[in-house]
Amino acid sequence: MTVRASSVGLAAIAVLVLAAGAMAQRGGFGGRGGCVEGTSEAPLPTFPPLGEFHFIRMQYTDLPGHHRGFGFASRNAQGNGWWIVDWPDADFHFSEGVNRLTRIDTGAPLQMSLTDDRLFDNPWIYATQVGWWDLNNTEVARLREYLLRGGFLVVDDFWSQDPDSWPVFARTMARTLPGHALTEMAESDAAMHVLYDIRDKDRTWIPGSRHLQCYGDSVQLVQPAGTTPEWFEMSDDKNRMVVAVNYNTDVGDAWEFADAPRYPEKMTELAYRYGINYIIYAMTH
């Protein structure tokens, strides 16, 4: 099997904020310390079972000592481990954005482990909270094979507040692609301009719902102390970016709460621009 790279035709359209449309708005308070939590009673968007792009969420085992036990994600989804954070709303909302903003044939979001053979049928995978993942040697070897055969990994929502998170991630990637450094993503990188132009001025912190505090009708963003948003990449021997790193920022929450009236519209817009650029880069390079 090989990773399939498909050509992508794109309409010349502006970024649309998916705070309305087919998705019902959510309200409510509490949950994870923010004020945009709530459960939509509207059904999730529907997608065909097969497409040239599926949002693939990576399932993994947590590090001992950092295990997230049985708990809830969005829409009262239940499961064990950090991999479920923002699932399934982030996956479905972002897929709906890809479907509406591009001509990519978008299929239903899926979740799978690195040892699932379906992995190689998909050009793009997403993993959250990777400062707490614990990939074994078999999983590392499979991730290496996937990336070297043309796959693309996006990692998101891990923070310098946990001083162990970056070393855990960096050691895993050094095992995956020995000799390939994690470097800062430059404004000039093709992935920043393949569809939407993302400039240095756009590299702003994207908050998680837990970073929003509501006072009446106003919403205040509270950035964690000592955190600076950064974007990194890892390339293969052909200088093709194969890993995109969103560090000290929470793109997944911006997707998850794309239908929440209190979540900042500008942050949602930026998160969609990042994600769609990553997809198109992965499918065309």
Image (spheres, rainbow, N blue to C red):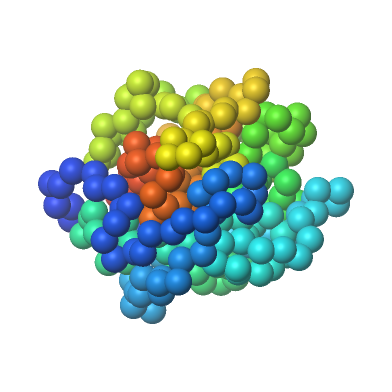
User: Picture coordinates of residue 179 (x, y %)?
Assistant: 62, 33
Residue at position x 18%, y 52% from top?
10
Closest to the observer, 38 or 218 = 218
Quarter occupied by residue 23: bottom left
* Horizontal arrangement in the rendering, residue 3 relative to residue 37 (left or right): left
Residue at position x 69%, y 33% from top?
166
User: Picture coordinates of residue 261 (x, y %)?
Assistant: 39, 49
Closest to the observer, 283 or 25 = 25
* Horizontal arrangement in the rendering, residue 169 relative to residue 207 (left or right): right
Name above or below for residue 62 compared with residue 193: below
Residue at position x 68%, y 55% from top?
82
* Horizontal arrangement in the rendering, residue 80 relative to residue 248 (left or right): right
Residue 280 visible to an observer of this rendering? no
* Horizontal arrangement in the rendering, residue 127 relative to residue 169 (left or right): left
User: Picture coordinates of residue 100 (x, y %)?
Assistant: 24, 59
Name above or below for residue 125 compared with residue 215: below
- From this viewpoint, which residue is outermost toward the left? 12
Residue at position x 15%, y 47% from top?
13
Closest to the observer, 190 or 218 = 218
Name above or below for residue 33 compared with residue 112: above
User: Picture coordinates of residue 153 (x, y %)?
Assistant: 51, 49
